[in-house]
Amino acid sequence: HSAKRAALSHAWYSAAQEAARLDHLGLVSDLRAAVAQSQLQMWLQPKFSLAGTGQPVGAEALVRWIHPQRGFVSPAEFVPFAEQTGYITMVTDWMLDQALQTLQAWQTTHPALSIAVNVSTRDLQDAGFAQRVGQKVARSGINPQRLRLEITESGLMEDAQKSVELLHALRAVGIPLSIDDFGTGYSSLAYLQKLPVSELKIDRSFIDGIDKAPRTQKLVKAMIEMGHGMDLFVTAEGVETEAERSTIAQLGCDVMQGYLGSRPLYGAQLQAWLDSVTEAPALSAK
Ligand code: C2E
Ligand code: MG
Ligand code: MG
Ligand code: MG
């Protein structure tokens, strides 16, 4: 009897403890309101080709939460926590809607730019996710190629077999998929080969100071060659200096993203950047 009570109280205690841990910032309940009350913002960080004139190829959508009392809450802080509580699915849906609306707005002015939305493993656990995304894309009338979805390598490894199936369902909708934070998630090459992805995004930990690190250059070169061998585009994340840019360009990397090219943009800053973008000749021909 007392053992059972102890077990129960232990279970209760851990549940309460877990809730308290998650609510240490008082954010759990706030996150639901955040979506409903438009406290979220979609910022866009441009990505640039490393070939030719270095033209922009698109942007990554990064969520920002402007909390009424706390002010800016970093995604590094609330995304992991939104994943644990399941609220991330609301955030993802909201970001997808924003991205699709933006792509609609760019339809005539910037039809060559894509937008990548970050998807969490929690989203992939929902068997209806691919269908829901497919419906959103269909309703928007946007070419699915202009939307991209990023999934972290470590996230993919959480339930490898299931991930393969869900990625195939998403790919069937026509949306290109990217592996985010590549190089940090311990995926096996045998497994990678099965994933229907079209882009590897090399984690910024490899890019930081790469111009001064010959061994890292060899490693990144191998990643790029492996990616190309599998017909993937390879993007370097977190490029901050010209020396880093020229190093990765020399190693054959296709696309760069990072503060050197642009910080994430919003509002007037985003508009100013868009106004400065000249489309590829074929698209802007009058
Ligand atoms: P990520 O998907 O790898 O996104 C890139 C992160 O690197 C962004 O941080 C971006 O601002 C930052 N970054 C870009 N260039 C540079 C650079 O040159 N130097 C440095 N030091 N950092 C750079 P952010 O926006 O704080 O997002 C952090 C992470 O939070 C993201 O990493 C992603 O995993 C997650 N996240 C952001 N938005 C969303 C979202 O809408 N949904 C989900 N599920 N996760 C998101
Ligand atoms: Mg990302
Ligand atoms: Mg990343
Ligand atoms: Mg990351």
Image (tube, rainbow, N blue to C red):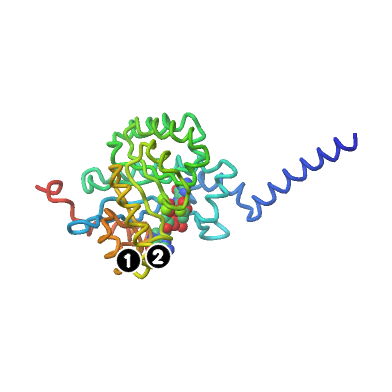
Depth check: give the residue in front, 206 or 147.
206
Mark carried by residue 64: none
- In the rendering, at what x and y percent does residue 236 appear? 34, 56
Q: Disc 2 beta carbon < 8 A from ligand 1?
A: yes
Residue at the image position 41 percent from the left and 35 percent from the top: 167
- Foreground residue among 190 and 240: 190
Q: CA distance from mark 1 to mark 2?
A: 7 Å
What residue is pinned by disc 2?
A: 208
Establish if 86 lies above or below 166.
below
- Asked whether the beta carbons under mark 1 and mark 2 sit within 8 Å of each other, the answer is yes
Q: Which residue is mark 1?
A: 244
Q: Nearer the viewer, residue 215 or 111?
A: 215
Give amino acid for label 1: Glu
Sequence-earlier tag: 1 or 2: 2
Residue at 49% x, 51% y is: 39
Residue 95 image-quadrant placement:
top left
- Residue 183 in the image, given as x and y percentages of width and height: 43, 52
Tell me which amino acid carries mark 2: Asp
Q: Is residue 63 visible?
A: no
Q: Quadrant of residue 96?
A: top left
Answer few, some or many: residues within 10 Å of disc 2's Cα (few below 14, many 20 plus, some between 14 and 19).
Answer: some
In this orientation, does residue 30 appear? yes
